């Protein structure tokens, strides 16, 4: 059955998303091909993780295992972590430093650019066996990806016709990533969360500003962030990425109390016994205190006050994905600033006071919709119809979700008739 | 030489620690900590890479109380029961008076509201325990998580 036969878009503005898209195994298989190996840039990792020649890390792009390392040429190279001989995982360690990569199965050996450089007993033994003389090692390297760094953030692609990275990001996102990476960074640690739901539910979560202060009640209970403060969304011209931003302290308690009372949502009832770790130290020229910058299809770059992190979405199957958090600070941080950032990571990650709920939100939607073949989710907070411009001045929206679906559909070849872009 | 009554108090503390979480008596569980306690949950992969990042860090009892209040009043999480299995308890004397290092292995199973259980987390406790007025109190609890790809989310203490 072709994808077009499996479902149809109820509306051309993607304000209804058929649940089938989150649960169908064939659709997942095609996503790995057309999205993750298709014409887009994928977030790979950070240059700061592979500083020295020979430094390597293993990761996943979609469900494809990938190695990235810094070569002797000083550049970062990435290739599929699968031996060209019999398909074994070449590098089993998560990180390290090495002169080359050797598969343990038959000891085929690759250089740091993924080229095959050594095959044991290539000429056989006593003139018998081995590879035929016309075997060309140049044809049997690890499958290479194209890698580009944007101010220290590494992106990779399987495509040779994707647009330039900076154009793919668009001006708002390029500006924001440059802001985050305005000086050399230092990785402080990792967190992982294995969520039993479809990876696209999380992409929607990142583009749904409406849930922020409704689901994450820590913020309202302790009066930290509110729907009434200044903030909104910035998009790229194709509307595939989203940058949710907010500035704390830009609303009055009276405004907030009134709005929340009208919405019948609880507001600021409790105080923390020790809120010293929450303080926001200005470190950017703007006053933005929260920014959740998602880049299609597998990345989020986050600043929550002084807590900085990347989030890497690693789909495992149609039913689960890993969310891989890399916490970072700057190389010139004082020990005290590092401590402050680490204390603020209490807010993020699988146990984060304002993020742990996302795991539950994704799972309860996934669980309740798996049998739905002809119903759809409702995406129209902030309006319907075409997405106009690249700035939306409200936190009470989920418009960027529709942009995600529009671009996803383009890559998958399943755009709605007259679908918006 | 560790006085047997101290050894007994530390053993009881470690086991009661798990039982109180499993019984949802988290407010009572807080009483096990000193006011200047440290409570830290660390992924094993960060320990291996010598990186300071943590999953949870409370640098005093007030922060730990806030965690529990937030869990009760604000956070949404997967509805579940916890079950701790705590074993391989090793106790060492520390140079300070009435202070001990205690290490133990733990496994936490979670059971959802359909009565299905899963292994949620395995790892290690590295505690510093003080004997104060005959009672054992936790001065430091560092939890090193082997299951560092946390299933779903982490809301109740390990």
Image (cartoon, rainbow, N blue to C red):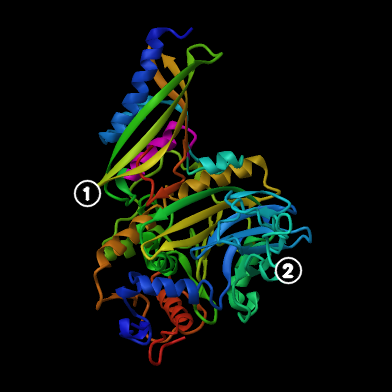
Residue A296 located within the stretch drawn in magenta: no
Name the residue located 32 percent from the left edge and 85 percent from the top edge: A5
Q: Is residue A236 above or below residue B27?
A: below
Q: Is residue A121 above or below residue A40?
A: above
Q: Disc 1 is attached to a residue of which chain?
A: B
Q: Is residue B60 above or below residue A197?
A: above
Q: Position of residue A343 (x, y in %)?
A: 52, 43
Q: Position of residue A40 (x, y in %)?
A: 56, 75
Q: Look at the image and give the residue range highlighted in magenta.
A: B57-71
Q: Is residue A113 visible?
A: yes
Residue B113 badge: 1
- Residue under label 2, please give it: A133
* Near-viewer residue (A138 or B101): A138
Disc 2 is placed on an element classified as: loop
Label 2 – label 1 distance at C-alpha: 64 Å
Quadrant of image for the N terminus of chain A: bottom left
Query: Residue pushed farthest left?
Result: B114
Sort mark 2 into few (<14), some (14-19) or many (20+) by Cα contacts within 10 Å: few
Q: Disc 2 is attached to a residue of which chain?
A: A
* Left or right for A49, reference A33: right
Disc 1 is placed on an element classified as: loop
Name the residue located 33 percent from the left edge and 69 percent from the top edge: A23
Quarter assignment of residue A183: bottom right
* Left or right for A256, reference A154: left
Q: Nearer the viewer, mark 2 or mark 1?
A: 2
């Amino acid at each position: 059955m072709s994808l077009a036969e499996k479902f149809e878009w109820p509306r051309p503005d993607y304000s209804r998303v058929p649940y089938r898209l989150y649960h169908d195994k064939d659709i997942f298989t095609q996503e790995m091909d057309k999205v993750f190996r298709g014409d887009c840039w994928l977030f790979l990792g950070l240059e700061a993780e592979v500083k020295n020649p020979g430094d390597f890390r293993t990761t996943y792009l979609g469900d494809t295992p990938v190695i990235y390392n810094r070569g002797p040429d000083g550049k970062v190279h990435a290739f599929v972590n699968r031996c060209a001989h019999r398909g074994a995982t070449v590098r089993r360690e998560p990180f390290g430093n090495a002169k080359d990569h050797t598969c343990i199965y038959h000891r085929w050996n690759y250089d740091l650019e993924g080229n095959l450089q050594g095959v044991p007993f290539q000429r056989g033994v006593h003139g018998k066996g081995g590879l035929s003389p016309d075997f060309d090692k140049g044809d049997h390297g690890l499958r290479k990806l194209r890698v580009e760094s944007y101010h220290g953030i590494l992106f990779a692609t399987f495509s040779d016709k994707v647009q330039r990275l900076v154009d793919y990001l668009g001006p708002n996102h390029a500006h924001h990533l440059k802001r985050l990476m305005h000086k050399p960074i230092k990785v402080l640690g990792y967190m992982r969360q294995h969520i039993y739901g479809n990876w696209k539910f999380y992409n929607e979560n990142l583009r749904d500003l409406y849930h922020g202060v409704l689901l994450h009640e820590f913020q309202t209970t302790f009066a930290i962030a509110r729907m009434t403060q200044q903030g909104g969304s910035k998009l790229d011209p194709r509307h595939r990425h989203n940058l949710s931003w907010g500035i704390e302290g830009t609303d009055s308690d009276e405004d907030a109390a009134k709005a929340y009372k009208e919405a019948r949502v609880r507001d600021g009832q409790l105080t923390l016994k020790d809120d010293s770790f929450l303080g926001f130290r200005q470190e950017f020229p703007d006053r933005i205190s929260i920014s959740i910058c998602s880049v299609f299809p597998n990345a989020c770059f986050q600043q929550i006050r002084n807590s900085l992190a990347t989030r890497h979405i690693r789909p495992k199957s149609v039913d689960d994905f890993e969310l891989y958090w890399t916490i970072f600070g700057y190389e010139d941080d004082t020990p005290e600033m590092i401590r402050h950032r680490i204390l603020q990571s209490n807010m993020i990650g699988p146990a984060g006071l304002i993020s742990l709920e996302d795991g539950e939100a994704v799972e309860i939607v996934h669980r309740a919709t798996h049998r739905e073949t002809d119903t759809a989710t409702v995406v129209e907070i902030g309006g319907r119809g075409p997405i106009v411009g690249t700035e939306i001045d409200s936190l009470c929206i989920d418009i960027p979700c529709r942009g995600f679906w529009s671009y996803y559909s383009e890559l998958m070849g399943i755009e709605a008739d007259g679908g918006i872009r | 030489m560790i006085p047997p009554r101290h050894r007994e108090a530390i053993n009881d503390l470690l086991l009661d620690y798990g039982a109180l979480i499993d019984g949802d008596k988290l407010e009572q569980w807080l009483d096990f900590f000193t006011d200047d306690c440290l409570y830290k949950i660390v992924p094993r992969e960060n320990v291996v890479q010598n990186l300071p990042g943590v999953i949870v860090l409370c640098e005093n009892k007030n922060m730990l109380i806030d965690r529990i209040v937030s869990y009760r009043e604000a956070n949404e999480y997967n509805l579940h029961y916890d079950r701790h299995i705590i074993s391989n308890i090793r106790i060492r004397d520390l140079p300070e008076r009435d202070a001990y290092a205690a290490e133990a292995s733990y496994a936490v199973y979670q059971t959802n509201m359909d009565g299905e259980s899963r292994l949620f987390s395995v790892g290690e406790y590295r505690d510093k325990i003080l004997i104060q007025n005959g009672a054992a109190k936790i001065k430091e609890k560092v939890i090193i998580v082997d299951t560092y790809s946390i299933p779903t989310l982490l809301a109740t203490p390990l």
